[in-house]
Image: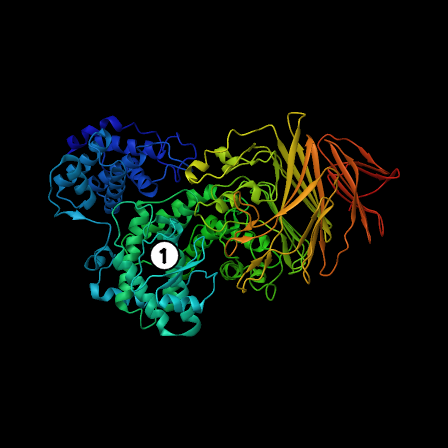
Amino acid sequence: MTMDLEPLRDYTTSAPDSLPPEIIPWERRAPWNLDHTARVTLGLLLDGDRDSDLLLAAADYLLVFNKEGYTQDVYPDALLLNGTALALCGYLCDHPEADLWRVTGSARLATAAHERRAALSDTLLARCLLAVCQVADELDAPILADLVTLRERMWGRLLDHSRAERLSVAEAEYPQHMADPIPVEQVGELMRSRVWQQGLRSVNFMGGDQEEADNACNNLITLRAHMLVRHQFGSEIDWTLRLFDDKESTVSLGAQSFIRNLANVYADTGDEQYAVHAARLLWSFYRLNPLPNHHQYLGPWRTLEVGNRQCNMWPGIVGLMGQSESFDAATHAMMARSRLEHLRYALAYCGWTNNWYQVEASGMAVAALYSPELTHADAYLRIALRRLKWINSFAYYDDGFQFELTHGYHVFPTVSIFAVVQAAQARGVELPADFVGLVERAHEMYLFAQQPDHFLPTFNDCNPNPMDPAPLLQAAADAFERDDFRWGATHGAAGQAPDHTSHAWNSAGLYVMRDRWDEDAQYLHFDGAAWGASHQHEDKLNFMLHAGGRLLIGDPNIYSYAWTEQTHYFKSSRAHNVVLIDGIGQARRFNPEARLMTQGRNEWVSQDGFDFVSSEYLEGFAPDPFQSDDRAQWHSGGPVDTRFQHRRAIFYLKPGYWILCDLLRGDDTEPHTLEQLFHIAPIFDLPAAVPLRAGVVDVTPQGIVTRDPGLSNLAILPVDSDGLSARAQKGETNPARGWYGVMGEFPAWDVTLETQTALPARLDAVLYPLDPGSETYPAVTRLRADAQVTAFRISGAGIDDTFILCEEESGPVTVDDITFEGRALLLRHQPTLRALAVNPVTVQVDGVEVTPE
């Protein structure tokens, strides 16, 4: 039989002196990368090895991992060789998991062959496929149906299909996959009788919507994946439907959140009709979407939805409705078969190395925990946890923030890995302590990042529905016994308030300034982070500001992934609170390294009386014109101009106001057009027919002031109004200007302060919250501005403050009667002299030393 493998000799390599590592090495070309492991395994097999520790460890490694690493693949043959080596191990080795190796490897081989179009001229493909088929023939063993068909296509003759097998599991076959087989007619009752799953449910952060549930009973389905639309399906669901050429419509169907909502409403009402239709829809999905043998990149078997269904939808459906009349033994047996099919598919395939991989592996882990009857239940769980260990080693920063750096996409993988913790706790299965610790740490984002109105911010791509993380915190409070989580979950009604207000995710580069914990608190969230692993916007140094019970400066988010002018706008610098230079914005999309790291220095100081943050953008600027082809968009707009740098510092006097300081530097002395952008948050009235509406704003070079009656407002007060022009835009197209992507796409104010000047240049402003009915705000007077120092005085009723900000190596600075050496100083002159300073060396007033607080 070794002779059948000899044509593969050219694709082998010698084995290193060590066993494979637990997780994939970060360096793509290091030993034990995916391509290297497959070649080592083939070499061992050709040399007659069938049971060495090295071979078995390599086979297990190939089973666990089928992605090369983070970002794009660099070995074009890695998947093909992985599938071939793994399938051959399954056929040739006597091992308890050999059937997993055989089926999984064959499925990956089939996927690679389909993607390479079954070309006989592809010598590597032809040799790999023929070797696996011939070994199966000699052993008279089962063979994946797709491999037989591919062999027919490539060599042009029809073959015997009597030994063909599939990834799918027939009803009669299910007991064969059980550790202790029982008659097939008893499977459903076994599943239905499990007490532990009756109280277990995935976290529900949307709540039950009875109107939506009533509509679903009539196949009027609400689609929420980066859209908010409904579609009437008639008598049967088309699970592959794609509306307005937006794949997210199919994603909404595949995720089955509308079935989860039926479970929520059933729990609220006890009305059996909701269970009837939930079971009907689950059966519809099962019957109309048979499990494919090879990887499907879109549609009901897209890997992200495969994972999502198992960790975030089905546990709640079973937990809430599993004992209803409609969820009879046949339905439970069907769900058990489908759960196993999800496991087999998730074992064979995975998607991108971002939140997808995290959700997919979490779904696999939860499905394994829900299937203790399976022979390979422990193997599935072990593999899922090993995958999670790998992806989480770089998908979360040390401080617990997920590496896409978006609050919305932090939720998705975090709620998924939390589902693993919940299922394990219900089953009494111990998980690795480092995994559980990471899950707990990731939940801290919900507590410390939430705005005073309890909604999460919307940096980068977030869901268009505002999210209160209270349900997430409630579940985490129970799981981790955290009183501060319980406090956040109940909006302060129970538990214990956090021991600090302002919070930094220093590893991620995100910062929250806050004066207290209540709905009228002052709050600013600042972005000094990397571009992000995916779902990125060109928005470093962006911020959101909330005061007096409302969001005042916002991030417009994104509504849809349909590639429109508005979608492009939401991703661009123009849609963020940043600075454009000569009409062009940030351009990190051209730099792959910007996904995980950022250039420049971040500073963060938080004390009782003030917070200070500073960061800088050094990665270049480029035009960003809208391209109708979203694939072309990523290659348009270059070249990147690296002559310019933007440093932003924000000083927050708690409670009181913020000072915004922008320093623009460049490599020439020519005048440049600078546009400082502010996105005035619309007024939120979520239950209304129009949930967001642009308020009233006065815009002049001397100040931008919102004037919404009965609400808190904001005055943005430029320090230098001479030579400054101001404009406000909303709801414009061609090009898009002035939109907000929450609950739809709504007009909202983009306000621009523009000037022409040589660099270096300063754009400084005071951000001053106004109580309802108040129209009084201070005056701001320039004292000094140059490349090293900015200084000005803020004075008005009850206010007399001097602010000085110094760059590196400024040395002692004298402004009026103040001498200061350090990074930043706010000197309050009344009612008593008070100094708040960042990195102070010297503070003197009239020659007298002053000790900062």
In this rendering, position of residue 382 left or right of residue 456:
left
Instruction: Locate residue 647, reporting x and y percent.
Output: 65, 36
Number of disc labels? 1
User: How many neighbours does mark 1 have within 10 angstroms: few (below 14), some (14-19), or many (20 or more)?
Assistant: many
* Residue plotted at (28% across, 65% down): 331
Residue designated by label 1: 253
Residue 216 occupies which quadrant of the picture?
A: bottom left
| Relative height, residue 395 to residue 174 (above, below) | above
Residue 427 screen position, x and y as percent = 38, 60
What amino acid is found at the position of numbered circle 1 in the picture? Leu
| Left or right: 775 as drawn, with respect to 627 | right
Q: Is residue 406 above or below residue 425?
A: above
Task: Depth check: give the residue in front, 132 or 295.
Answer: 295
Residue positioned 31% across, 66% down in the render: 279
Is residue 801 in view from this perspective?
yes
Instruction: Classify mark 1: helix, strand or loop.
Output: helix
Residue 565 place in picture, x, y as percent: 48, 44
Q: Give how far across and how far down residue 187 sits, in percent.
A: 25, 64
Residue 428 shows up from this direction: no
Classify residue 469 as left or right of residue 128: right
